[in-house]
Image (tube, rainbow, N blue to C red):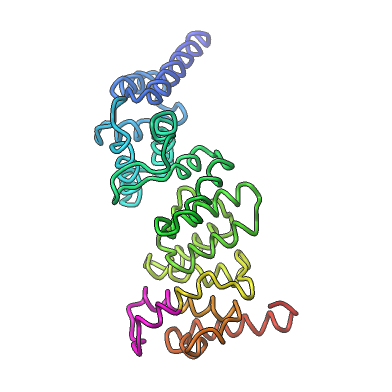
């Protein structure tokens, strides 16, 4: 009897492994059939639900073995959209991205840094990142940030930080994450975020704030306060952005919460970088006007650090 049960469970594993091979080959209809058989034999077999969610999504999205590079790049973004909408579990979204990354990196995509139409652009380094090819991801993303800065969005700086963090290049990771957090924290890709403390801080904020705008808007402040990031003195790479942002605001400080928090964080960056002399307005006065309670918390932390001999 026990031998018979063991054979049944072994058959379920075989069907699951067959499904994995079929998923890699983008044979999603066949993979679905293999998963259904595995589920009938052993409905409690590990990862069946995740594999089924991946397979179902791919079939619905029209993924197939002969699809173009552009279609694959579009499907990557559709995967992200489904994850953010809550219709695709994180584990399935990550698996779908890994399937797409492997397919793209073995095709014509290896000849270029980009794939897809302008609004659906996908960078090769992001594919390497999805597959934990840290060195290759860091190389490609650093090239994007330095050689093609007009194409590098804040999310790409976050990806560069992820690759550097995985490689234990702490200084590089710190600077890249600062660029993400203090320009557009809302663009963070939580499926790839490697920085453990940043992830924990955001999780805590999500429990304390029902509003996602407030949660991510406050994230840079608590990342700084809790020493998850360090803003180097004299660092000027966000100075031009801070000046431009203030110029666009003019005398207007009655802003939507998202805009107010973004401007507050840029002011915090200027203050911590010790660049007040480089800018034509009083950053602390602006911080107080934008977010009085948060500013009081900021001053308290600045004083605490001063007493402790920290900057």
Camera-side residue of 280 and 283: 280
Does 258 appear in magenta?
A: yes
Q: Is 42 above or below relative to 290?
A: above
Q: Dividing the picture into quarters, in which one does residue 150 lie?
A: bottom left
Residue farthest to the right, as pictured: 309
Q: Residue at coordinates 52% horizontally, 72% vertically from top-left?
A: 221
Q: Residue at coordinates 48% horizontally, 69% vertically from top-left?
A: 182
Q: Residue at coordinates 51% horizontally, 56% vertically from top-left?
A: 146
What range of the chain is rendered magenta? 243-263
Question: Where in the figure is residue 67, as x and y percent of width and height?
Answer: 28, 30
Does 1 appear in magenta?
A: no
Q: Is 216 above or below relative to 48?
A: below
Question: Where in the figure is residue 253, as x and y percent of width and height?
Answer: 36, 87
Total residue callouts: 0
Check the picture and name the quadrant holding the C terminus.
bottom right
Q: From the viewer's perspective, is 73 left or right of 209?
A: left
Residue farthest to the front, as pictured: 147
Question: Where in the figure is residue 73, as x and y percent of width and height?
Answer: 33, 40
Question: Where in the figure is residue 264, as x and y percent of width and height?
Answer: 46, 79
Q: From the viewer's perspective, is 96 left or right of 29?
A: right
Q: Main secondary structure of the magenta part?
A: helix
Camera-side residue of 201 and 160: 160
Camera-side residue of 39 and 169: 169
């Amino acid at each position: 009897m026990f031998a018979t049960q063991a054979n049944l469970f072994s058959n379920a594993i075989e069907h699951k492994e067959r499904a994995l091979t079929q998923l890699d080959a983008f044979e999603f209809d066949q993979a679905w059939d293999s998963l259904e058989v595995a589920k009938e034999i052993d409905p409690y077999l590990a990862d069946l639900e995740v594999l089924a969610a991946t397979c179902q999504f791919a079939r619905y999205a029209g993924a197939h073995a002969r699809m173009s590079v552009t279609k694959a790049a579009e499907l990557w973004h559709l995967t992200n959209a489904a994850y953010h909408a809550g219709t695709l579990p994180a584990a399935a979204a990550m698996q779908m991205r890994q399937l797409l990354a492997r397919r793209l990196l073995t095709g014509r995509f290896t000849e270029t840094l980009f794939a897809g139409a302008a609004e659906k652009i996908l960078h090769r380094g992001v594919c390497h990142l999805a597959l934990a090819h840290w060195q290759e991801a860091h190389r490609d993303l650093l090239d994007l940030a330095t050689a093609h800065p007009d194409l590098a969005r804040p999310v790409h700086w976050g990806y560069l930080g992820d690759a550097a963090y995985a490689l234990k290049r702490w200084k590089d990771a710190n600077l890249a994450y600062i660029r993400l957090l203090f320009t557009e924290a809302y663009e963070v890709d939580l499926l790839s975020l490697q920085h453990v403390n940043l992830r924990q801080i955001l999780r805590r904020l999500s429990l304390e704030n029902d509003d996602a705008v407030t949660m991510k808007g406050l994230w840079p402040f608590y990342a700084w306060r809790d020493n998850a990031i360090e803003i180097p003195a004299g660092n000027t790479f966000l100075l031009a952005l801070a000046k431009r942002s203030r110029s666009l605001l003019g005398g207007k400080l009655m802003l939507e919460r998202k805009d107010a928090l973004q401007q507050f964080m840029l002011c915090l960056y200027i203050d911590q970088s010790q660049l007040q002399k480089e800018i034509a307005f009083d950053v602390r006065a602006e911080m107080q006007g934008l977010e009085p309670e948060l500013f009081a918390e900021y001053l308290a932390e600045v004083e605490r650090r001063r007493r402790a001999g920290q900057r």
